[in-house]
Image: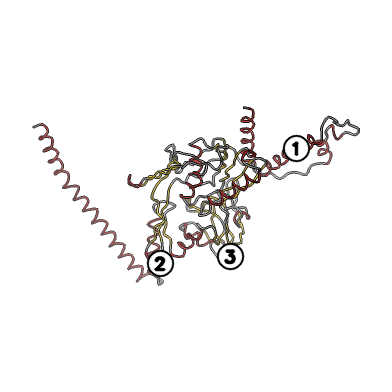
Amino acid sequence: MAVMSGTLAGAVFTTQVAGPLLAQEADQEGSVYEQLDLFGDIFERIRSQYVEEVKPGELVEAAINGMLTSLDPHSSYLPPDEFSDMRVQTRGEFGGLGIEVTQEEGFIKVVSPMDGTPAAEAGIQAGDFITHVNGESVLGLTLDQAVDMMRGPVGSEIVVTVVRKDIEEPFDVSIIRDTIKLTAARARLEGDTVVIRVTTFNDQTYVNLEEGLKKAVSDAGGMDKVNGFVIDMRNNPGGLLTQAIEVSDAFLDKGEIVSTRGRNPEDSERFNAEPGDLAEGKPIVVLINGGSASASEIVTGALQDHHRAIVVGTKSFGKGSVQTIIPLRGNGAMRLTTARYYTPSGRSIQALGIAPDILVEQPKVAPQEPEEDASAADRARTEATLRGSLTNDSVTEDEKRVLEEEQARAEQAAKLRQEDYQLAYAIDILKGLSAIAEAK
């Protein structure tokens, strides 16, 4: 009787509540249809009564894009030409300035300039705000509209007005548009360290990384001669999620790389590493800064959470969302934010970024004053420079050669500190770890 009473009570309660819920749902559906009718009325009024003739297709595109951009800065409508350009960009070659941008407070914010592009060579920096293009304000424009203003024929000039932190007045930068050809990843030797520069995550990133790493290790004389790896992802705006997973997997033997969680629990995905480590267990330092976003943050978070790498630099950009490109009729597409991603420890970096293990700012280069000859001579004075000083006859030619090589390496390291302090810091960490390992 007790069980039955409970069941009957539940049935009565459900019946009492279901009525209002169904009515409320019907009201909501009715409200949506009314708003769609309102949209149709406004569309028709604009088409027939606006002071100038407008193209209906452009009105519809603007309405769609307005609906998407109202959601977040990364959702948008891609007309057929932009969709085609995007597919070309993921293959690593396209025309433009070479900057990744987002929108903030109505202006265009530079996420990062890409290495070797016109924007980078012109001095555009991550964090810059672009307020005008060729003298025309971008305030009030959508991100896509502002990007359209910056597009143009290869070889043509564009003048952008930039607002930069720590500089009081806006200033103009002239840039010549060019064909952007990106090598997504390349590697080089700095002493005994392999430095891997990853500029973007396109179709070629993992292939470039693997080939470059193997060649650099071979040039060093084998993995035994390498003290570690620096993965430089500063000013890397991100790109393809699949490539971020492959690059992370390249240095992890097991464990979760990243998980994505959408609106519905069944849409969640988890990506795990497979056995195999291109670095063969050698220590890794990851370099990031405020221009490191999206896919580069996925790689950084995975290696940091698994304690596979020491993260050096400054806090990353903080883009922790996943966009899905959905093709639409008419050859256009919709870029829609469909999920958030989480690092292996379960943290979301959306709007927070990844904090480095060791905070290292890149010092601003101050103009050097000319040095007097006397002071330079004083600094160069050593026992060996004194007239008539005794020679060291206990040093063999081989030992002398080793000393000279060590001195050359020390001078090269000092030069690197002047050119790129963050990278030099990362290499010094690996030297220290290598020295500790040898002492054991």
- Residue of label 2: 58
Earlier sequence position, callout 3 versus callout 2: 2
Name the residue beneath numbered marker 3: 154
Q: CA distance from mark 3 to mark 2?
A: 26 Å
Checking the image for residue 407, the label placed there is 1
Q: Name the mark nearer the viewer: 3 or 1.
A: 1
Horizontal and vertical percent for residue 383?
84, 31
Badge 2 or badge 1: first in the primary sequence? 2
Say which element carries label 1.
helix
- Disc 1 crowd rating (10 Å Cα; few below 14, some 14-19, many 20+) is few
Q: Amino acid at mark 1?
A: Gln
For the view shown, which residue lies furthest in the top direction? 440
Callout 2 amino acid? Glu
Of tags 2 and 1, the one toward the viewer is: 1
Asked if the residue under mark 1 is in contact with the one under mark 3, i.e. CB atoms within 8 Å, the reply is no
Frontmost residue, 46 versus 320: 320
Q: Is residue 319 left or right of residue 227?
A: left
Kindly indicate whether the residue at mark 2 contacts the one at mark 3 (C-beta within 8 angstroms). no
The C terminus appears in which quarter of the rendering?
top right
Toward which corner of the image does residue 327 lie, by quadrant?
Answer: bottom left
